[in-house]
Amino acid sequence: MTIHRSVCPFDCPDTCGLLVEVENGRAVRVTGDPDHPVTRGLLCPKMLHYEHTVHSPRRLTTPLLRTGPKGAGEFAPISWEEAIERICARWTTLIEEQGGETILPYSYAGTMGLLQRNSGHPFFHKLGASRLERTICSPAKDAGWKTIMGDTPALEPSAMEQSDLIILWGINAAATSIHAMRDAQAARRRGVPVWAIDTYRTPTCEAIDEAFIVRPGGDGALALGMMHVILREGLADREFIATQVHGFDQFEDRILPECRPAQMAPLCGLPAATIERMARSYAAAAAPFIRLGSGLTRYGNGAMTVRTITCLPAISGAWQRPGGGVFPGTATGAAFPLHRVTREDFMTAPTRLVSMNQLGHALNELSDPPVKALYVYHSNPASVTPDQNAVIRGLLRDDLFTVVHERFLTDTARYADIVLPATSSLEHPDLYRCYGSYASQRCNAAIPPVGQSRSNWEVFCLLAQGMGWHEPFFRQSADDLIGQLLDFDTPWRDAETTNRLRQGEPAFLTPPVDTGQRWQTPSGRIEILNEREAEPLPRPLPTHAETDGFPLRLQPATTPMALNSSFYEQDGLRARQSCMELMMNPADAGMRGLSAGQQVLAYNRRGEVGFRLKVTERVPAGTVVTEGVWWREFIPGARGVNCLTSQRLTDGGRGSTLYDVTVEVKAA
Ligand SMILES: Nc1nc2c(c(=O)[nH]1)N[C@H]1C(S)=C(S)[C@@H](COP(=O)(O)OP(=O)(O)OC[C@H]3O[C@@H](n4cnc5c(=O)[nH]c(N)nc54)[C@H](O)[C@@H]3O)O[C@H]1N2
Ligand SMILES: Nc1nc2c(c(=O)[nH]1)N[C@H]1C(S)=C(S)[C@@H](COP(=O)(O)OP(=O)(O)OC[C@H]3O[C@@H](n4cnc5c(=O)[nH]c(N)nc54)[C@H](O)[C@@H]3O)O[C@H]1N2
Ligand SMILES: [Mo]
């Protein structure tokens, strides 16, 4: 038995260090690395049996060619040579007939490794394919932050330890960031109050001091109401504001008359008295720490919401005390020279951009040229993309040539013409950074590839050869490229840090500090007023759902037992979720004559989805919640929650608006 260090590759802010026990080339046990500074030995339920994913009997082991109708899941094994030949032949013909933009790559975050995640970019840039706008997650958060804070780097997340009030705002940390939850619990034990602000009582709400349940998309109004109280009652830090904030007078002129708690209460769903109490507690805290999640960003007003919340520590002056401020996540883009992998210079001219949130539109409506070929890797768009019915309609097109590179026969892979088997993270090397802390780590393969599976980078090298390209770039090994990412002078890491990374040890990157200018904005101040924006000042903006016309707000939320559509291959984890459920308040159920445990249909203009009804006070009246992104094969009726979500985009960042949707519910 040998023990290998590895890293969790999944799309989670914590990016854990792993210890993998290997016997006869198989991973037999996975534990959290006790020496990793963030993980400290604690692993989530999903990764605790990662070996069940890696050695699942469901793993794809050979390339497959479709033998039945599209979507039927009927395939025959073929060799890698034949698969690559068929793909390259078809693409060559399509490029001659329609031009390169007829090919659309689709990838997201099956692996977060810097090399494997980005290794399709150089290939598709050289091919002249359409480019995918990878904005399904939370670009509205970045856009909202940037409007007021510019390029100011985020706080060090461990600053939370110095805070005297912790607010988990729109984040279900007990499921999605368990180490932040652990740290918040530790603070609680020291007597620091912890709040959660969410749209229903999540597992996080059960484990903190006070939960505030808001109306979906109403947090901007809540923050404005709080700031009104802070200003009206003289609780603002006028000295901090005078030297550090741009546009305060205009802001005050607006929010004193327009954002009284009584005016904000119906928008945010909390009573005026609660808004007042929250404002006073917030202002009374010396260093309140807001950990900002992504849930509240996936709305037609998501960027404005983030921007508004980010004003709070500027008004109260919390920024100037250690532990005070807003933590939206870390951005470490400059720490590694990613352009050495992505190779924008391989593009002869910029090709068209297609939003990943509007795949349904792209496959069914785009012309000039239409999308005739789709190449999906480390993503499962048939499950995770909004407006599932439109996506499936597109995938069913007989004239669409679809290739899917996957570990499992996912909903998307079932619609492929050719399926290619992918390695898991234990079978290939990579370099990881993370978005919940400044930790980074590289790792080697711990076991040989399962079956004939190949890594993303290896497949793009094969495709490059299949296309007859002679670029030496595509003849490099993964280790060559990882070496180039590390071999780069940057203020983010000193020689010792880089050395540790080279040796596979976890290490912290350090955001460079500009001692001359704390706020990295054009004015050098926190820009509460931003004249470059269509909306120069924060104000309450409506969500899309406001005018949709169905009575219940649907929240397609996350579960601790899966990660987006990943982990549904683990029978044990799936069993702990039982089935796809819809949670509803007793008042809403009573009004509709529905009872717990019965089959119901949730519907709107885009589709109709079956659920088992769970009647619970955890959900307020007017909101319904489902957790997890189930594979269609495990859903009676085979329609996932994303049949109900919309292709509409956020107000900033062109993000997805997965939480901004309404439905009606009836007995099935
Ligand atoms: N176990 C598990 N972990 C995960 C994931 C997973 O699916 N499962 N997904 C991973 C990914 S890709 C991401 S991006 C992160 C996301 O992790 P988080 O930032 O936690 O985001 P979500 O879980 O989408 O939403 C967080 C909470 O916001 C709430 N919410 C929705 N709308 C609003 C609103 O208008 N106001 C407020 N205050 N709250 C609202 C939701 O009910 C939810 O409880 O987690 C990652 N980690
Ligand atoms: N209803 C609803 N929809 C959502 C969400 C939600 O909470 N609710 N969350 C949204 C969010 S925040 C996000 S970020 C997106 C995430 O969307 P995706 O990035 O598509 O995430 P996953 O569903 O985890 O699918 C990743 C796939 O990659 C495969 N994979 C893993 N490693 C590799 C590899 O090395 N190579 C290859 N080729 N394949 C690999 C896995 O088997 C898996 O099927 O989903 C969004 N959609
Ligand atoms: Mo995400």
Image: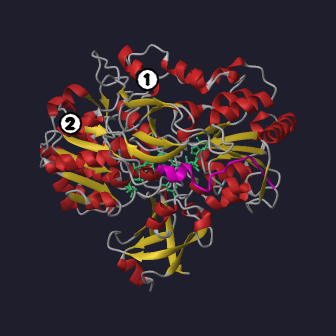
Question: Is the residue 209 above or below the residue 355 in the image?
Answer: below
Residue bearing the label numbered 2:
323
Q: Identity of the amino acid at label 2?
A: Gly
- CA–CA distance in space, label 1 to label 2: 33 Å
Question: Is the residue 552 above or below the residue 559 in the image?
Answer: below
Residue 14 belongs to magenta span? no
- The x and y percentages for residue 587 are 36, 79
Please tell me the numbered disc located at residue 356.
none
- The x and y percentages for residue 388 are 62, 59
**Number of other residues with Cα within 10 Å of mark 1, as a class: few under 14, some 14 to 19, many 20 or more:** few
Q: Residue at x 62, y 44 (%)?
A: 450
Q: Identity of the amino acid at label 1?
A: Gln
Q: Residue at x 69, y 59 (%)?
A: 392
Is residue 299 in sight in this rendering?
no
Question: Is the residue 316 above or below the residue 273 in the image?
Answer: above
Residue bearing the label numbered 1:
503
Q: How many marks?
A: 2
Label 2 C-beta lies within 8 Å of the nearest ligand 1 atom: no
The quadrant of the image that shows the C terminus is: bottom right
Q: Earlier in the sequence, mark 1 or mark 2?
A: 2
Quarter of the rendering containing residue 614 = bottom left
The span shown in magenta is 50-66
- Looking at the rendered image, the disc whose residue lies closer to the viewer, 1 or 2, is 1
Residue 56 belongs to magenta span? yes
Q: Residue at x 15, y 50 (%)?
A: 189
